Image (cartoon, rainbow, N blue to C red):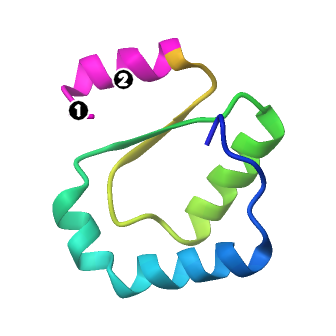
Amino acid sequence: ATLSKNLRSELRIKQGKWIEQNRKLISEKVKHAVFVIPSLFVRVILKGIFALSKPPYPYTVVSTIDEAKKIIETKRVLV
């Protein structure tokens, strides 16, 4: 997410539908997701979205790559 640009709303909707249609597969394949979001504003919005519609996998939202690396090492997450 750090390097991505804003997605058009039609693509966000399409992505959301794909996640819902593939929820079981995603929950089986994704061990843990770490989202690196430097913007406090965007982190708060993402956490709000996830509170309403929790992803089908464990996740952590952080502000820096260094934080993400620590999470990956701690949880022994494969990337």
Q: Which residue is mark 1?
A: 77
Q: Are marks 2 and 1 in contact (CB under 8 Å)?
A: yes
Residue type at mark 2 is Ile
Q: Secondary structure at mark 1?
A: loop
User: Is 72 covered by the magenta stretch?
Assistant: yes
Residue lying at 75% horizontally and 48% vertically, measured from the top left:
5
Mark earlier in primary sequence (2, 1): 2
Who's the residue at 65% across and 81% down the image? 13
- Predominant SS of the magenta segment: helix
Given residues 67 and 22, the one toward you in this image is: 22
Q: Which residues are magenta?
A: 66-79
Residue at image location 33% in from the left, 50% down from the top: 58
Residue lying at 21% horizontally and 34% vertically, measured from the top left? 78
Side of 49 where 50 appears, left or right? left
Q: Which residue is mark 2?
A: 71
Q: Position of residue 72 (x, y in %)?
A: 31, 25
The quarter of the image holding the C terminus is top left
Q: Quadrant of residue 70?
A: top left
Q: Using the image, tell me which numbered label, if any, was put on residue 56.
A: none
Q: Position of residue 29 (x, y in %)?
A: 19, 59
Image quadrant where residue 56 sits: bottom left
Q: Is residue 50 left or right of residue 42?
A: left
- Estimate the spatial distance between the alpha carbons at disc 2 and disc 1, rounded to whole Å: 8 Å
Q: Is residue 75 above or below residue 19?
A: above
Q: How many marks?
A: 2
